[in-house]
């Protein structure tokens, strides 16, 4: 039985064959093939993924996942570009993150500027000849691109990097050793499991580890569901990042609820209950490559890690930077009880204001 019917174009689509293994639904694959077949050349050259999302009838993150898979399959080129903050002129296309760089001089207006992963650096996509051959005379339409960008806004490099598909499939798009790219504002969380030492003693390594993995899955899926990314695990802990602090709060509240459900399923009660100790901070940081994969570094990351050590369980220790964001602040007030916290953290000024959110 054939699952897909592409007789509409009198040919079997190459792309659907190659993308099927990534688990996309037939509807998604059909939409992709249909769009590639009907689009004008200018819609397929240095194209804005948000415009594609509209054409495909998909959400932004799902569209980015399709783009990542198609890039891996050699059907598309993923372009990293920089936009001048003054004249909006788009600089040369880099084919990898390592080719972008932080400092730029605009070729159009001579303005010198720094580009950040969440401001200035953005992604576009171009079909490769293997998928559809574009006419060099018709594909490059700067006026059309400017209209699309004005209407839809750009997809930042950070949004692309935070797509789970990017992490899984294009993790090798790393930065050269010693090179970093900045993020202006990132919400970073660190979590740890309360009482995991006793937990391992009681259950034995194998069973305890199985439950710890279940808990990783809860955190990873919650981050992905709320437009963030779990970057890595450290021992029984997880580090995750979000472009928007509001999404971080949503994901962490979901994670605490997920852990409560795990406790119930597993019959963990009272002092055996697993509880998340979380630290959350918002600020600038840098993206680097460490041990062959992308990772975040900087003071914001260090502070988030230290905050998690102050948590007691089912709570989030957060800095005032989080409450400065009105959306995040409103969510925090709904999520549980917010208590002021006085603590001296190594390397931090005395007046560093902290809050403890006890999640109801
Ligand atoms: Zn410029």
Image (cartoon, rainbow, N blue to C red):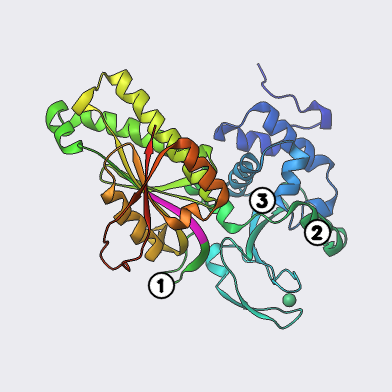
In this rendering, the label closer to the viewer, 2 or 3? 2
Residue 20 point in image, percent of width and height? 60, 32
Q: Earlier in the sequence, mark 2 or mark 3?
A: 3
Q: Which mark is residue 178?
A: 1
Left or right side of 193 for 55:
right
Q: Quadrant of the C terminus?
A: top left
Residue 70 point in image, percent of width and height? 63, 45
Q: Earlier in the sequence, mark 3 or mark 1?
A: 3
Q: Nearer the viewer, residue 21 or 39?
A: 39
Residue at the disc numbered 2 = 145
Q: Quadrant of the N terminus?
A: top right
Left or right side of 314 for 269:
left
Q: Which mark is residue 76?
A: 3
Q: Residue visible at 27% across and 31% down?
A: 274
Q: Is residue 215 above or below residue 45?
A: above
User: Of helix, strand and loop, which one carries label 1?
Assistant: loop
User: Is there CB contact under 8 Å for labels 2 and 3?
Assistant: no
Q: Label 3 vs label 1: CA separation?
A: 29 Å
Q: Nearer the viewer, residue 271 or 45?
A: 271
Q: Residue visible at 65% across and 65% down?
A: 81
Q: Is residue 130 above or below residue 295?
A: above
Residue 298 seen in render: no
Q: Which mark is residue 157?
A: none
* Picture quadrant where residue 115 is located: bottom right
Q: Earlier in the sequence, mark 2 or mark 1?
A: 2
Left or right side of 219 for 52:
right
The residues colored magenta run: 185-189
Residue 287 seen in render: yes
Task: Report the label total.
Answer: 3
The reply to whether the residue tagged 1 has its Cβ within 8 angstroms of ligand 1 is no
Q: Label 2 vs label 3: CA separation?
A: 18 Å
């Amino acid at each position: 039985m054939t699952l897909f019917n592409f007789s509409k174009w009198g040919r079997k689509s190459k792309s659907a064959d190659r993308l099927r293994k990534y688990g996309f639904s037939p509807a998604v694959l059909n939409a992709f093939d249909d769009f590639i077949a009907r689009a004008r050349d200018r819609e397929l050259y240095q194209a804005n993924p948000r415009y594609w999302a509209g054409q495909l009838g998909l959400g932004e993150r799902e569209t980015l996942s399709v783009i990542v898979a198609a890039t891996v399959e050699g059907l598309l080129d993923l372009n990293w570009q920089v936009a001048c903050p003054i004249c909006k002129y788009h600089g040369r296309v880099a084919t990898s993150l390592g080719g972008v760089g932080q400092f730029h001089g605009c070729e159009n207006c001579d303005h010198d500027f720094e580009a950040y992963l969440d401001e200035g650096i953005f992604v576009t996509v171009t079909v490769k000849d293997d998928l559809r051959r574009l006419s060099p005379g018709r594909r490059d339409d700067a006026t059309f691109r400017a209209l699309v960008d004005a209407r839809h806004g750009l997809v930042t490099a950070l949004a692309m990097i935070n797509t789970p598909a990017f992490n899984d499939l294009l993790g090798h798009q790393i930065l050269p050793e010693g090179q970093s790219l900045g993020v202006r504002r990132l919400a970073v969380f660190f979590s740890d499991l309360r009482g995991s030492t006793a937990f391992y003693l009681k259950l034995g390594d194998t069973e305890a580890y199985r439950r710890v993995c279940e808990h990783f899955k809860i955190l990873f899926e919650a981050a992905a569901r709320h437009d963030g990314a779990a970057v890595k695990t450290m021992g029984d802990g997880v580090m995750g990042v979000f472009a928007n602090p509001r999404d971080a709060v949503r994901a962490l509240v979901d994670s605490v609820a997920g852990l409560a459900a795990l406790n119930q399923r597993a019959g963990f009660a009272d002092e055996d209950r697993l509880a998340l100790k979380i630290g959350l901070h918002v600020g600038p940081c840098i993206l680097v490559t460490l041990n062959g994969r992308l990772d975040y570094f900087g003071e914001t990351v260090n502070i988030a890690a230290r905050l998690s050590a102050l948590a007691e369980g089912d709570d989030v220790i957060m800095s005032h930077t989080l409450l400065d964001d009105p959306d995040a602040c409103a969510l925090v007030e709904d999520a549980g009880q917010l208590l002021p916290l006085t603590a001296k953290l190594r390397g931090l000024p005395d007046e560093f204001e902290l809050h403890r959110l006890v999640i109801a």
